[in-house]
Each structure stands twice: as C-alpha cells, then as structure tokens.
Image (cartoon, helix red, strand yellow):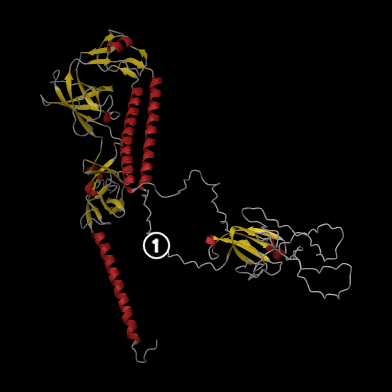
Amino acid sequence: MNLPANFPLKKVIITVVSVVIVIALIITGVTVAVNGKAANATVDVEQVSNISTQYWGDQSSTYGNATSDFVQELYPDKEKAISKIFVKEGDTVKIGDTLLQYDTTKLQLKVESKELEEKKKKYELEQAEKELTKLQNTAPYVAPVIPEPEPEPTPTPVPESQAELYTEITEHSKPFKGAGTEEDPYVFLCTEDAVLTKGFLLKLLGVTDPRATPTPTPTPTPPPTPSAEPTAQPSEVPTATPQPAVTPEPTAKPTTAPTEAPTPAPIEPTEAPAVSGMAWFKQMTFIKTNETGGESVPTPEPDFTLPDGPFVARFEVHEQDNENLPLVKGWQMDGDKISAGFFNEVISEPDDIQMPDLSNADPGISYDTGGSMYTAEELQQMIADKKQQIQDLKLNVKQAAHDLEKAKLDLENATIKSTVNGVVKSLTDLDTAMSTSSPFLVVSGGDGFYITASLNESLLGKVHVGDTVMASSWENGQMYEAEIVQISDFPNDNSDYYYDGSSNPNSSTYQFTARIADADGLKNGMGLDITLQAASDNASNAIYLFKAYIRSDDGGKYVLKVGDDNRVHKTYVKTGKTIYNQYLEIKSDTLTEEDYVAFPYGTSAIDGAKANGMEENTDENDGIDTRGLDA
C-alpha cells in the first residue's frame, strides 16, 4: 500500500503500541485482583466428624408379649435328617447347651440346589431384558404405499395386412418381401398347416421337370411321294389329359386308309395324402382333368410366376395372420444347399444370478431378510407384556435369593442349642410327633422373662441370634434390653406382625424369641413395642456427610477440603445413597473424618481461600495444629 509522503506513520505505531499495553495492564490487573481476593479471603471450616454420621442399618418395629414361662419346642422337619440327639427327657439344660445335630449333607445339597435355582432365575431375567431391548429397537411394519394404477395406454393401431395369406404355396405364389437370396430371402405369409406344391419345390431347387412336354417346333413338310400306304400326319399331343389309344378292328386285308401314330401312355396323376401341418407335396402332376374325363381345360395365364431357382424362401406364421404383428413360428428353405430349418422368435436367457457366498458366514449372525412383521400396536402390546414378565421375574429372583438365604441359615443352624434355662420336659420319636403334629422335644424354662414377637422375612439374614432388641412397655413406660435367642425356621400361619410402614405387609413373618436379663416391673403377658436394628450391607465406617457441604458443577460433586497449605481446594468426591434425607454417602477415599471442609456457598467460599476455625495444637515445640498442618 502506498502512503502519502506526509502520512504520520509514527503516530499510528505509537497508538497501536499504547492500546496493546493498556489491554495487557487490564488483564494483569484482573488476575492480580482475583488472586489477591483468594489470597486475602478467609473461610470458616468444620471437621468432617462434626458434620457427618454413621449408618448402622434400618430400624423396624414390631409388637410382642412378655412371658415368664417360656417353652422351647422342636417339631419334626421332613427336609432335615437328625444325626444325633444329645439330651434325654428330664435333663436340665442352660441357654447354649446343644440339644441335637441335623445331618449337614442334605442341608448342603439344599443350599447348592437353591444356588442353581437363583442362577436360573437371574438368567431368565437377563434374557427377558435383552428381548425387551430388542423389541424397543424394532421398527414397526409399515404397509407399502400402493401407487395409483396408471391408465392403460391407448393401443397403437396395427396396420392392415398387405400380404396375401397362403394355405398352399405354388410356383405362382407371390412373396410379400425379399429377393430370394440368403441375406434377403423370399418371405411368404402362410397358415400353420400350409403346404408346398411340387411345382414350387422344383422352382426352389432350380430343377426342370423331365416329364414336362416341350413345346413342339414346326418342321417343313417334305413333298408327297407315292406310297402303297399313306402315312398319317403327326398330330400334336395335347399336354392336358391324354386320350386313350384307338384299337383298329381286324379286317381280312389291310386297307390303304391313313392311320394315326400311337400316342405314349400319359402319366397318371397322383394326389398327395391328406396330412396336417406342413406338407411337402400336394400334387404330382402338372395337368388337371375336367370332371367329365375329357380333354384338359386350358388354365388362364397366372399373373406371377417365381423365377427359376435355386433361391431361398422363408415361410412365416404371424399373430392374427398379419405380418405386422409378432411372429409365431416359421421355417426357411435354401434351394442351393438343399436345407431347411424351423425358427421361432429368439428369447434371450437371463444372465446367471450371482448368489452371495454364505459358506464362511458366521452361524451366530442372523441375516435380516426383511423388515419387521409387527405393527406399531402389536409392538406396544409385546413391549408391555415383556415388561410385566420382567417384573414377575424380578420377584422370582428375590424369592430365589430369599430361599437361598434361608437354606444357608438352616445349614448354619444345623446344631440346635437350648434357648432357655430349664428342663427337657418331653422327648418322643419322630414318627409319633409327625402323625400327631406335635413337638418331639420340649424344653420348659422357669427363670426370667422372654419376649415373643415376629419379624418380616426381608429381615432374615440381617437379624441374627445374639442381636439386641429394644422393648418398651405401654403400662410402666420403661425400656428393656433383650437378646434374641431363637428365630423360627418356619413362617407363621397367620400374621400377628405389627406393620410399621417400613416393610411389605404382604410378605411372610417369622417368630423370634428374645430373653430379657433385667425384667424389673414386667408382668406375664405384658405388651411391648419392639425395635429391631437390621445390619447394614455397607461397612459401618462409611461416611455420611451433611448434604449442605456438598456442591456440584459440570465436573461432578465436590467439597471445599482444606489442603496441606491450610487453604481450601475444590475436591471431587463419589457419592452413594442418602439417609435420613439429610446425609449423603461419601464412597471415595478422598475424605476422612479427620479432614476439614468449608461451607461451599457464599462470597468467601472460593478455591484458595484461607481456612479459619481449625483447632491448633498449643504445643510450643511443634507449632502445628491437630492435623499436622502449619499454623
């Protein structure tokens, strides 16, 4: 670009440099201000142990009664075989003494059977879920759009036939085209049963009939000479039907009257037999007789006669006997080569169809041969049915897991111990107990109080013998601590279970017994509210942090955790379930109860802010706080 000589270039350069410097100063100022704000900001922090809790499991409530004469009864079980009984009738037993031992072999087989059943139910559920996914990804069948029928085109008028149709082809038949050569043969329009005459064939082959009478040429008559017997003048033999020879009557003496010379016997006409289809010959003569058998009647001179051959002729049969319509069939004859051949319209064969080579195909892959065969309504119904099936299978899986857990408990409890301090009141044989539906072993206790209540089947495996339950009396308002000494192996016939809304009221219940060590103020039959503490599936040392100290952004959930520099930094954590609607489980190892975190909201809650509120160690020798951070 050419600038004028007096253009102030120096001023432009100074202006640009100034603008760049101003922008740099602004960016630097903003950065310093932000960092200065973070460096000068102070945020209060709290120790994790002060704002978190631990989860020991769900609580469940039930109802029971206190009794001072508790009896332990053992009923026969068809699915269990007793291997040994350690007591006899009248023995005194204490809580924990072994009463009998079940055969563990059968119980172990039962556990293995229940494990297989659980795996089967899980497999059925997985297959049903796969089928549901397949149905949800299936496109419905869409009926093809049938196009409107196109109007039939107006047929092109066919020209009228200009060729003569022949049922008999003679030497006087006229072809409708051609020159008689191999490249351009004579073409005749004929019917399917057309015949060829001998005269035509001789023309085709270029052969002269040896029996044809040549046309006589006049010869000069010699002068008459005297003769004893006059000679008869030769007469022209008619080429039509010959006359029979005249036989003279015998006389005593020959006469001198002139006689006619004998005429050779004519060729008898031979008619071709009546045949269907193409015939090579129809007649074998070149003359016709009249009906009276007299001399032939001269035929009129034909308008057309084929030239002498040899030549090539083609005979065609067309639809509706019209040479302008498609060819039906035909044949061709070559008089020079003495050959004939039939021909039809040539129909080209289709090219070979190339089929895909599936010899090496994976048999596990299904090749789609078309679209879906189900309509949208059918697919919706199938999806709904499959979802219902999945719900049923999920219940089956839960039931199978419950049965497996119960079988494991039976195996663990193969050794039956006394749950009361008392005396073996009765011991009968199994057959008698089975027939009378009565217990075969009864231990009667007389000391202390017991609580008899029921628990939901969902708590089996979470509540165990030896666990502690809390009971409260309606009458005296006191709290009692009791130890579970027995959980029944069989569900209750009718549920007296007190439903507190935390479990399924339609599930089965199992009776349990708990012994109260300090039973002051209790009476026999007193009603008690019982609280059960179900064991948690998670570790008891899991941290459940107060939800207000957890914030989230595009990177996930995080806390403002105090680092080694005594400042808070954004630290991302993995979270689990929520308990009591206020605490969120911290599943990652990035946070412990000894750590400090800041409330993540407010103007001072920024990454890099200085932590305030941490307890400092007063030890003058180390000068560090309780977490080991520099004060």
Q: In which quarter of the image is residue 523?
A: top left
- Kindly identify the residue that appears in the image at 55 percent across and 68 percent down: 162
Asked whether 396 or 355 is in front, the reply is 355
Quarter of the image that includes the N terminus: bottom left
Q: Quadrant of residue 530?
A: top left
Instruction: Tell me the amino acid under the disc marked 1.
Output: Pro
- Kindly identify the residue that appears in the image at 55 percent across and 53 percent down: 354
Q: Can residue 73 be seen in this view?
A: yes
In the image, residue 1 above or below residue 62: below
**Residue 297 as seen in the image, left or right of residue 66:** right
Q: Where in the figure is residue 415, as x and y percent of width and height?
A: 34, 18
Badge 1 element: loop
- Kindly identify the residue that appears in the image at 38 percent across and 54 percent down: 144
Q: In which quarter of the image is residue 336?
A: bottom right
Q: Where in the figure is residue 120, as x and y percent of width and height?
A: 39, 33
Asked whether 62 or 417 is in front, the reply is 62
Q: Mark 1 points at which residue?
A: 151
In the image, residue 8 above or below residue 417: below
**Residue 183 as seen in the image, left or right of residue 591:** right
In the image, residue 517 above or below residue 435: below
| Label 1 crowd bin: few (<14), some (14–19), many (20+), radius 10 Å | few
Asked whether 497 or 621 is in front, the reply is 497
